[in-house]
């Protein structure tokens, strides 16, 4: 059964909807990285990191491959960083709007 466009969008957005997964993507913005490098850089337990990486790979946000004992990861489409930038801008706007509403009250 073919999945709808909205179901595919939901899968991607759900994969992005966790602070650790956003941190992983931010770390990968600099390029390809191994899970052995990401865990200490992000101060995550290997099992926790693996769970988040698996979600991002399953959603098609990341690509993974093995090189010997290393498992490397890279972002499949750099437009995901534009999504993160947009989400950050929306969050900033929401905070500012709430602060203005609070000051007016």
Image: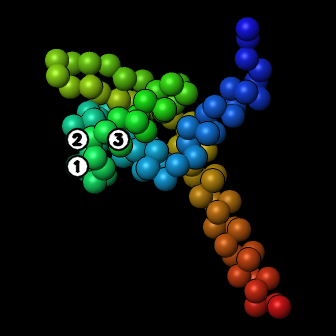
Percent position of residue 96, x then y: 69, 75
Proximity of marks 1 and 2: CB atoms separated by less than 8 Å: yes
User: What percent of the width, then of the height, locates residue 73?
Assistant: 35, 29
Residue 74 is left or right of residue 60, and the answer is left
Residue at 56 percent of width and 37 percent of height = 15
Kindly tell me whether residue 51 is visible in this rendering.
yes
Point out residue 42 in the picture as x, y percentages from the top left corner: 31, 52
Query: Does residue 77 appear to the left or right of 48 in the view shown?
Result: right
Front residue of this view, candidates 95 and 10: 10
- What is the secondary structure assignment of the residue under circle 2? helix
* Residue that protrudes farthest toward the left in the picture: 68
| N-term mark: 1 or 3 | 1
What residue is drawn where x is 30% and y is 50%? Answer: 44
Q: What residue is at 26 percent from the left and 18 percent from the top?
A: 66
Question: In the image, which is nearer the foreground, mark 1 or mark 3?
Answer: 3
**Pointer 2: what residue?**
37
Q: Is residue 104 left or right of residue 15?
A: right
Q: Residue furthest top?
A: 1
Is disc 2 surrounded by few (<14), some (14 to 19) or many (20+) residues within 10 Å? few
Tell me the CA gap for discs 3 and 2: 11 Å
- Looking at marks 3 and 2 on the same chain, the residue that comes earlier in the sequence is marked by 2
Task: Give the quarter of the image for residue 47.
Answer: top left
Residue bearing mark 3: 49
Local packing at callout 3 (Cα closer than 10 Å; few below 14, some 14-19, many 20+) is many
Element type at mark 1: helix
Looking at the image, which residue is at 51% across and 25% down?
Answer: 58
Mark 1: few, some, or many residues within 10 Å (few <14, many ≥20)? few
Vertical comparison of 34 with 84: above or below? above
Per the image, label 3 sits on a secondary structure element best described as: helix
Which of pointers 3 and 2 indicates the residue nearer the eye?
3
Identify residue for label 1.
40
- The quadrant in which the N terminus is found is top right
């Amino acid at each position: 059964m073919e999945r709808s466009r909205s179901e595919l969008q939901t899968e991607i957005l759900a994969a992005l909807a966790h602070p650790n997964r956003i941190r992983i993507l931010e770390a990968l913005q600099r390029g390809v990285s191994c899970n052995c490098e990401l865990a200490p850089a992000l101060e995550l337990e290997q099992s926790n990191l693996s769970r988040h990486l698996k979600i991002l790979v399953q959603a098609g946000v990341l690509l993974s491959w093995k090189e010997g004992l290393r498992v490397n990861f890279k972002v499949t489409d750099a437009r995901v960083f534009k999504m993160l930038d947009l989400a950050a801008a929306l969050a900033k706007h929401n905070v500012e709007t709430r602060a203005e509403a609070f000051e007016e009250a």
